[in-house]
Amino acid sequence: MESIKYIYWQDQDHWLGYLQDYPDYWTQGESLEDLQTHLRDLYLDLISGKVPEVRKLAELTLQ
């Protein structure tokens, strides 16, 4: 089973979050489970090409 890391927090009555590799694309849910559902949908949209010009987080090794 594939997994992806995400950042989340509760803001009053809503849960907010984004996928760690895609920090520019936030979503929200009414519960943590609802947020996870939206994050899964967002991931599928991002990797399928439905979202144009997707920006992604990367790491550069300095020597």
Image: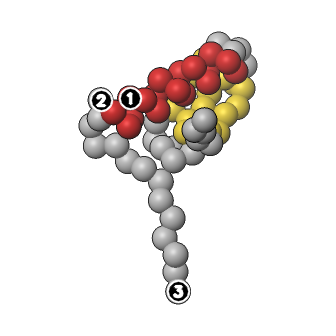
State which tag comes first along the sequence, 3 or 1.
1
Residue in view at x 70 percent, y 31 percent: 9
User: Badge 1: how crowded within 10 Å, few (<14), some, or many (20+)?
Assistant: few
Picture quadrant where residue 32 is located: top right
The quadrant of the image that shows the N terminus is top right
Q: Is residue 6 above or below residue 56?
A: above
Give me the disc on residue 50.
2
The residue that mark 1 highlights is: 45
Q: CA distance from mark 3 to mark 1?
A: 35 Å
Q: Amino acid at mark 2?
A: Lys
Residue in view at x 67 percent, y 18 percent: 33
Q: Are marks 1 and 2 in contact (CB under 8 Å)?
A: yes
Picture quadrant where residue 13 is located: top right
Q: Position of residue 19 (x, y in %)?
A: 55, 39
Q: CA distance from mark 1 to mark 2?
A: 5 Å
Residue in view at x 57 percent, y 20 percent: 37
Left or right: 10 in relation to 46:
right
Q: Amino acid at mark 1?
A: Asp
Q: What is the secondary structure assignment of the residue under circle 2?
A: loop
Give me the disc on residue 16.
none
Give me the disc on residue 63.
3
User: Badge 3: how crowded within 10 Å, few (<14), some, or many (20+)?
Assistant: few
State which tag comes first along the sequence, 2 or 3.
2
Q: CA distance from mark 2 to mark 3?
A: 37 Å
Picture quadrant where residue 45 is located: top left
Q: Is residue 57 above or below residue 4?
A: below
Q: What is the secondary structure assignment of the residue under circle 3?
A: loop
Colour basis: secondary structure
